[in-house]
Image (tube, grey):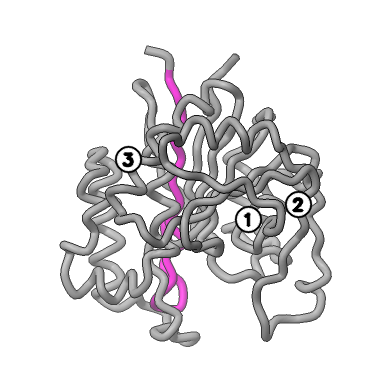
Amino acid sequence: MSIEPAFFIGHGSPMNALEHNAVVQQWRSVVQGCRPKAVLMISAHWYTKGTAVTAMPSPKTIHDFYGFPEALHQVQYPAPGSPELAAEIKTLLAPHQVELDLNWGLDHGAWSVMMHMFPSADIPVVQLSLNQDLSPAAHLELAKKLAPLRQQGVMIIGSGNVVHNLRMLDWQSTQPPLWAEQFNRQIIEFLLTKNFAAIAQYQNLGEAARLAVPHPDHFLPLLYVLGTTLDGDEISLFNDEILYGALSMLSVQLSHKRL
């Protein structure tokens, strides 16, 4: 079985679910020809006490936002779940405690991306939560236990944003502020040199990091993707753009090349 790629997707606004812009076209493009057995999704929007994984056969579509058009609230992404994959994830992450969750579903960080990458909604999707009690470095270490899934036909997708500060959004912005550019550029440098430990210590990047990542939820999914890196993986970047002054769409692909 071929080794599945892994992706971190800068998901931006929920409205991307309804858009046909250059960003979502690239989401479609990077999975051309891919047909994974299942997808493990780590979304910024499931930030929990403890770690949980969706384990229901038919996860619901969660509309976890407000102030958007009714058309967005009507979107459904009826992909099946996979209780079997959820159980395997629980085993892989042991002795770390993982709850098999039957209540959550797929939040907009998941389905707004998946509906472009796999529009037929016929590939099973399991979502893993972000444990708020773990440090970024601990998230990275936990993610390493998930790497074998890629060798079993499971695609791993993290959905968030490297720079995500809603309070600093400027809808008229045509040039990102220096702090956003600096932080985005530093993360790119660490990515291209595979210095993942430095990415997990992003708080050490000073004021730019404080502004770019005021809350860790949108940054942590990147660490889950990087943690699944295998020997022979190549890293490529796409959608490297900062929108509205405070929202980085930077996305990352891990592609395996046989050694």
- Considering the numbered disc 3 on the image, is that residue within a helix, a strand or a loop? helix
Q: Is residue 142 above or below residue 5?
A: below
Q: In percent of the image, x 24 and y 75: which residue is there?
A: 178
* Number of marks: 3
Which residue is disc 2 drawn over?
A: 59
Number of the front mark, 3 or 1: 3
Q: In percent of the image, x 43 and y 20: which residue is there?
A: 257
Residue 143 coordinates in the image, percent (x, y): 41, 40
Residue 247 belongs to magenta span = yes
Chain part drawn in magenta: 240-257
Which labelled disc corresponds to residue 141? 3
Counting other residues with Cα less than 10 Å from the Cα at mark 1, is it few (<14), some (14-19), or many (20 or more)? many
Which labelled disc corresponds to residue 110? 1
CA separation in Å, label 2 and label 3: 27 Å
The amino acid on which the numbered mark 3 sits, given as a three-letter code, is Glu
Counting other residues with Cα less than 10 Å from the Cα at mark 2, is it few (<14), some (14-19), or many (20 or more)? many
Residue 21 coordinates in the image, percent (x, y): 64, 62
Q: In percent of the image, x 23 and y 66: which residue is there?
A: 182
Residue 180 coordinates in the image, percent (x, y): 30, 71
Q: Earlier in the sequence, mark 2 or mark 3?
A: 2
Whether residue 50 is visible? yes
The amino acid on which the numbered mark 2 sits, given as a three-letter code, is Pro
